[in-house]
Image: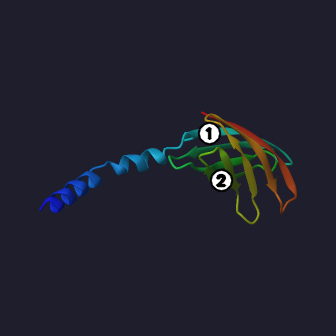
Amino acid sequence: MKKLLLLTLAFTLFTCSGGDDLNNSATNSVFQGEWSGTFSGDDNGTWTGTVDENGNIIGVAISTTFNDTYTASGTFSSDGNVSITVGSVDTGALFEGQATSNTVIGTWVNSGAMMNGIWSGSKD
């Protein structure tokens, strides 16, 4: 009977431990919010994006060189590494960089078009 009571108590403590709170805080990215910036080099323009609580970014890049708008998506990892694909994976550019809680800076390359440059931005 004592073993059954102890098992019941242990099970109750385990199921009421609030584990969901731990999961929510672990996925709350310090980078979450609205971001914007510029890119330059073989192409020039501006970019904007929204980083969600998991560090995923979705946005657009607007090329002044080609007068076109491209979709952008990628990630801000918990250690600040940033990787964003602009345009399609096959023909677009890869923007990589390092972020702090409110700034980002890096380089971009479009291997297919043999273009590259730098980019930067900040949290709005």
Q: Residue at x 88, y 58 (%)?
A: 114
Foreground pick, 27 / 70: 27
Colour convention = rainbow
Question: Which of the image's four quarters has the C terminus?
Answer: top right
Tag 2 secondary structure: strand
Horizontal placement of 44 versus 11: left or right? Answer: right
- Looking at the image, which residue sits at the far front? 2
Q: Is residue 95 left or right of residue 11?
A: right
Image location (x, y in percent) of residue 106: 76, 43
Residue 56: percent from left, percent from top: 57, 51
Marks counted in the figure total 2
Callout 1 amino acid = Trp
Residue 74 in percent (x, y) is at 63, 54
The residue at the point 77 percent across, 49 percent down is: 67
Q: Which residue is mark 2?
A: 72
Q: Could you tell me which quadrant the N terminus lies in?
A: bottom left
Write down the residue under mark 1: 35
Secondary element under disc 1, as helix, strand or loop, is strand
13 relative to 35 in the view: left or right: left
In-front residue for pair 28/50: 28
Residue 102, given in percent of the width and then of the height, sits at 62, 34
Q: Residue at x 63, y 54 (%)?
A: 73
Depth check, front residue: 86 or 100: 100
- Can residue 38 be seen here? The reply is no
Residue 58 visible within the image: yes
Which amino acid does the dot numbered 2 rest on? Ala
Q: Residues within 10 Å of mark 2 (few under 14, many from 20)?
A: many
Q: Are marks 2 and 1 in contact (CB under 8 Å)?
A: no
Q: In the displayed structure, would residue 92 be above or below residue 37?
A: below
Q: Residue at x 76, y 63 (%)?
A: 91
> As drawn, is 37 to the left or to the right of 33?
right
Spatial distance from mark 2 to mark 1, Cα to Cα? 12 Å
